Amino acid sequence: MAKVITVTNQKGGVGKTTTSINLSFYLAKAGKKTLLIDFDPQGNASSGLGIDKSDLDRTMCDVMLGDCLLKDIVVANKVKKLFVAPTIPELANVEVQMAEMENKFLILKRAIAPVLDSYDYIIIDSPPSLSLLTVNGMIAADYLLIPVQTEFYALEGVSQLLKSMELVRKAMNPDLELLGVLATMYDRRTTLSSQVLAEVKKFFKDKVFDTTIPRNVRLAEAPSHGVAIGQYDRFSKGAKAYKSLAEEVMERTK
């Protein structure tokens, strides 16, 4: 049965989608059949893996409205064992419609249930907000992975995210675990990055991944080519870091 990991942080620009794409890629390269669910209305995880959103007949919008099943929208990637459930900006409008639905917090969990036996991992890229979509992602997940940018105000908002996680645990998903906190955009040359990483470790202790994701131009370039970093430049520092992260994730979810 698939292990479901929601990548989330209410702060934008922390490397959430980059992490979702490249973690999914390296899990697939490790032989794990992986489904990446693009659950952010910006749809960057879809375009970042080469999907032309204008060509799509059905997306996560249709799944959330109950117009089709999740398996009906899944797109195979060039990478063996990597699959994507794409989305488009209309998902933001769908979220408004979801608010009127019965069991509005359970829609994603119920959509995923029929495909759990078809994958080893399901990665959910959630929006940079504490929205109805984000809560759906938390309730559908076994684990949360929180990317934290190693810059000033890194921990701002994380305490609110953890409170939301506890509320979800108590109300609807008692088995939800914090898989780990990932330090992103780390620059070992600056004192600030080191100080922030120390602060993150002090706050989260052993929940911080050993892997840190460096600031890396190649990582930033890869999505514009519609590929993961491992396809774009597998020898780059960013590629090595995300390969290492995938190994840690597999170890922590054994």
Image (tube, rainbow, N blue to C red):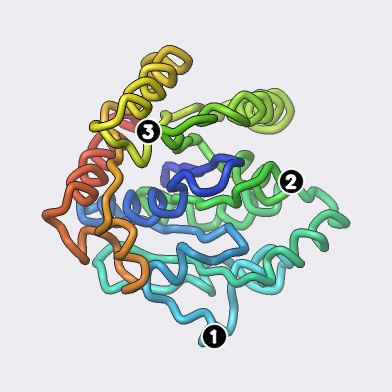
Secondary structure of residue under mark 1: helix
Q: Residue at x 41, y 29 (%)?
A: 180
Q: In screen coordinates, is 61 left or right of 248?
A: right
Q: Which mark is residue 66?
A: none
Q: Amino acid at mark 3?
A: Ala
**Dot 1 corresponds to which residue?**
54
Q: Is residue 176 above or below residue 40?
A: above
Q: Is residue 189 above or below residue 200?
A: below
Secondary structure of residue under mark 3: strand
Q: In screen coordinates, is 161 left or right of 98?
A: left
**Dot 3 corresponds to which residue?**
183
Q: CA distance from mark 1 to mark 2?
A: 28 Å
**Dot 2 corresponds to which residue?**
105
Image depth: mark 1 or mark 3 in front: 3
Q: In screen coordinates, is 170 left or right of 142?
A: right
Q: Quadrant of residue 222?
A: bottom left
Q: Quadrant of the N terminus?
A: top left
Q: Are marks 1 and 3 in contact (CB under 8 Å)?
A: no
Label whose residue precedes the other's in the sequence (1 or 2): 1
Q: Position of residue 102 (x, y in %)?
A: 85, 52
Q: Is residue 14 above or below residue 61?
A: above
Label whose residue precedes the other's in the sequence (2 or 3): 2
The number of numbered badges drawn on the structure is: 3
Secondary structure of residue under mark 2: loop
Q: CA distance from mark 2 to mark 3?
A: 29 Å
